Amino acid sequence: MTGNFAGRSEEETAKFRAVMDEKTDVLLRLISEHVSPPASILIVGCGSGIEAGLFAHFFNCHVTGIDIGADYEFQRTEAAPAELLLMDARSMSFADETFDLVYSFHALEHIQGYRRALAEMSRVLKRTGSYCVGTPNSERLVGYVQTAEPLVKKIRYNLRDLYARLRGRWSNELGAHAGFSRLTLLADCVAAFGAGTDISDKYYLSLYPRHAALIQASVVSGLARWIFPSVYIIGRKHARS
């Protein structure tokens, strides 16, 4: 395992573990199992920037987070030492092959013309770099299970999603933020980066170890396709011949 806040003081580690939820912890550890230790990371769709700060401390490296700033205000102090920039993911100002790792979580479904964002993510990723992209699962039957929102809001969100489905408006382009199916996200990532692996099953097995038998059964039966609320793709950039 390459991360785990190596090189940080106990005080710094305790501070960031206090704000890191279990989902982020599991995802960081999975990423660290699949990638070489990065010296530079780009977070696409960083929101407030807190997550970018967690990446910086976990991997002990330089992290840049970008967002268009429409829904969040940067919390620069809390996100330190990560660098936060206002920038459109579809037209980044970074030079080619700048970053060792590019990460994007629940951002693509908000981007009109998301394939341009994926192409830009690939462009700024080093030739031997790695990426991880996560989005909501558009085939999910129920969502928002993992969120910290009150039960009433979770029910409201799922009813909103159901209404969008019934009206034939279940798409990111129409504002539903539906996300992507496993096959669609994998295909788009492979097209952009040259290779990719679906780690959704591994993520949920790691997140819910006490329910491993049940999760494994859903994977084997194919029910995971509709049960898992999110999908995650990871891979290394493959140079085109």
Image: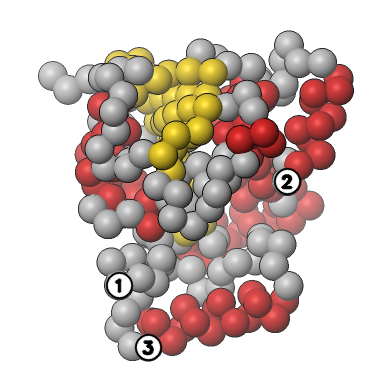
Residue at disc 2, secondary structure? loop
Residues at marks 2 and 3 touching, judged by CB atoms closer than 8 Å? no
Q: Earlier in the sequence, mark 2 or mark 1?
A: 2
Q: Which residue is at a point 62% across and 50% down the rendered structure image?
A: 204
What's the mark number on residue 166?
3
Residue at disc 1, secondary structure? loop
Q: Which residue is at a point 82% across and 16% down the rendered structure image?
A: 9
How far across and how far down the image is residue 75, in percent?
62, 41
Q: Could you give the CA–CA distance between mark 3 and mark 1, rounded to whole angstroms? A: 13 Å
Quadrant that contains the N terminus: top right
Viewer-nearest residue: 56 or 102? 56
Apparent side of residue 43 relative to residue 77 in the rendered image (left or right): left
For label 2, the crowd category at 10 Å Cα-Cα, with few meaning under 14, some 14 to 19 and many 20 or more, is few
User: Mark 3 belongs to which amino acid?
Assistant: Leu
Residues at marks 3 and 1 touching, judged by CB atoms closer than 8 Å? no
Viewer-nearest residue: 236 or 164? 164
Residue at disc 3, secondary structure? helix
Question: Which residue bears the numbered disc 2?
Answer: 21
Apparent side of residue 211 relative to residue 108 in the rendered image (left or right): right
Asked whether the viewer can see residue 57, the reply is yes
Q: Could you give the CA–CA distance between mark 2 and mark 3, rounded to whole angstroms? A: 34 Å
How far across and how far down the image is residue 158, in percent?
55, 78
- Eye-nearest disc, 2 or 3: 2
For label 1, the crowd category at 10 Å Cα-Cα, with few meaning under 14, some 14 to 19 and many 20 or more, is few
The quadrant where residue 125 appears: top left
Q: How is the image coloured?
A: secondary structure
Farthest-out residue, left: 241
Question: Which residue bears the numbered disc 1?
Answer: 174
For label 3, the crowd category at 10 Å Cα-Cα, with few meaning under 14, some 14 to 19 and many 20 or more, is few
Viewer-nearest residue: 181 or 150? 150
